[in-house]
Amino acid sequence: MRLNISSLAGRKGASFRVKRELPGKFVESAPEVIQVLGPILAELQVTNTGEGYLVTGSLSLEVELLCSRCLRPLETTLETAIEEEFLNHPQEHSEDPWDEDPLVEGNELDTTSLIEESLLVSIPMKPVCQEDCLGLCPGCGALLSEGVCDCPDPTIDIRLAPLSKLLAQTSETTTSERRKDHGSSKEKTFKSKS
């Protein structure tokens, strides 16, 4: 979205507000997003700071995501606040090439990348349909919220199952002979010389 700032030129402290609906299809490039359900609702304020133009505001976008636990679709609203200053001239003290401030281009501010980055970062890493979503059974893939499946109890880590069998076998074969003290663990007392 490009914003014309010619009305703010040379007027430090002057500002204007803008409300727009923008296309949000770019969000579908994120693997968590199934589809975008509406336009981006952008409410921004642009203020002349003297050294540049401060853009603040909020963005919201309705999307359909996949629950990270049960893999069912869920509808949610991505909401984020933005705050970025577009400078009239580049700062000379910045040595980091990744730390470049956006610049004013003539009488316009190009907020496209600012809006895109802000919305993409607002996508939750592990979206859930409900806080108490039980997810899927690791054995058969059944939805645990719909009922209990016939799979064995998952409390034992499958990687440790052979060790639990070995432990059961050794407890059955334990004899009194094995419990005898053969001198390997006898305590020895050391007396200090005074």
Image (cartoon, rainbow, N blue to C red):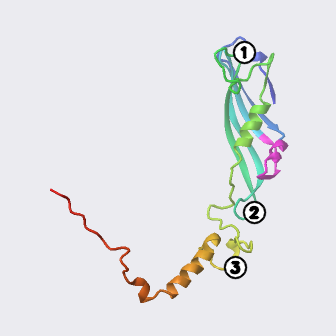
| Residue farthest top in this picture | 10
Rendered residue at 25%/67% (across/down): 189
Viewer-closest of 177 and 55? 177
Quadrant in the picture for the C terminus:
bottom left
Q: Is residue 4 above or below residue 113?
A: above
Disc 3 secondary structure class: loop
Farthest left residue in view: 194
Q: Earlier in the sequence, mark 3 or mark 2?
A: 2
Closest to the camera, between mark 3 and mark 1, is 3
User: What percent of the width, then of the height, locates residue 135?
Assistant: 68, 67
Residue 88, numbered circle: 1
Q: Could you tell me which residue is drawn at 59 percent across and 75 percent down?
A: 163
> Of circles 1 and 2, which is in front?
2
Where's residue 116, x and y in %? Answer: 77, 37
Q: Residues within 10 Å of mark 3 (few under 14, many from 20)?
A: some
Residue denoted by label 3: 149
Q: In the rendered image of this protein, does residue 136 appear above or below residue 86?
A: below
Q: Residue at 52% x, 83% y: name it.
A: 170
Label 3 amino acid? Cys
Marks 3 and 2: CB-CB under 8 Å? no
**Residue tagged by mark 2?**
71
Q: CA distance from mark 3 to mark 2?
A: 17 Å
> Which region shows up in magenta?
24-40
Report the amino acid beneath label 1: Asn
